[in-house]
Image (spheres, helix red, strand yellow):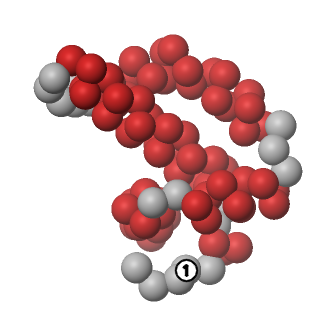
């Protein structure tokens, strides 16, 4: 993926990308433990169990910290965020 200018993204979009990545990691770990892909319910489970704490944590971060974390996300997550932004 070509380097994108993340400065053009609103902080809330970057925060959503960070949360989505955490949701994916939760779903993957849970699926590995169970031996099958738990699918979309894994995202809902993460939101119920960890969403509030994660949002609270993200709110404590500076803009630079959010930028740094977002920059470290896998390209597939950043690509998804960019595509969603173009749709809106």
| Residue position for label 1 | 4
State the image coordinates of residue 37 (x, y, percent, origin top left).
18, 30
Which picture quadrant has residue 33?
top left
Please report the residue visible at 38 percent of the width from the left and 22 percent of the height from the top: 44
Disc 1 is placed on an element classified as: loop
Which residue is nearer to you in this view: 35 or 15? 35
Residue found 64% across the figure and 29% down from its top = 54
Q: Is residue 57 rendered to the left or right of residue 29?
A: right
Q: Quadrant of residue 14?
A: bottom right
> Residue 23 lies in what quarter of the image?
top left
In the image, residue 27 sits, relative to residue 16, either above or below, namely above
Q: Position of residue 31 (x, y in %)?
A: 25, 26
Q: Count neighbours of disc 1 (C-alpha within 10 A) and say few if under 14, some if 14 to 19, many if 20 or more.
A: few
Quadrant in which the N terminus appears: bottom left
Please state if 14 lies on the left or on the right of 23 as rendered. right
Residue sitting at x 57%, y 47%: 18
Front-most of residues 23 and 87? 23
């Amino acid at each position: 993926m070509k380097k994108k200018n993340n400065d053009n993204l609103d902080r809330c979009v970057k925060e959503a990308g960070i949360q989505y990545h955490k949701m994916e990691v939760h779903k993957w770990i849970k699926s590995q433990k169970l031996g099958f892909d738990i699918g979309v319910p894994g995202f809902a489970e993460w939101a119920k169990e960890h969403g509030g704490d994660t949002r609270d944590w993200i709110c404590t971060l500076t803009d630079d910290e959010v930028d740094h974390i977002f920059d470290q996300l896998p390209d597939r997550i950043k690509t998804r965020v960019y595509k969603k932004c173009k749709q809106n």
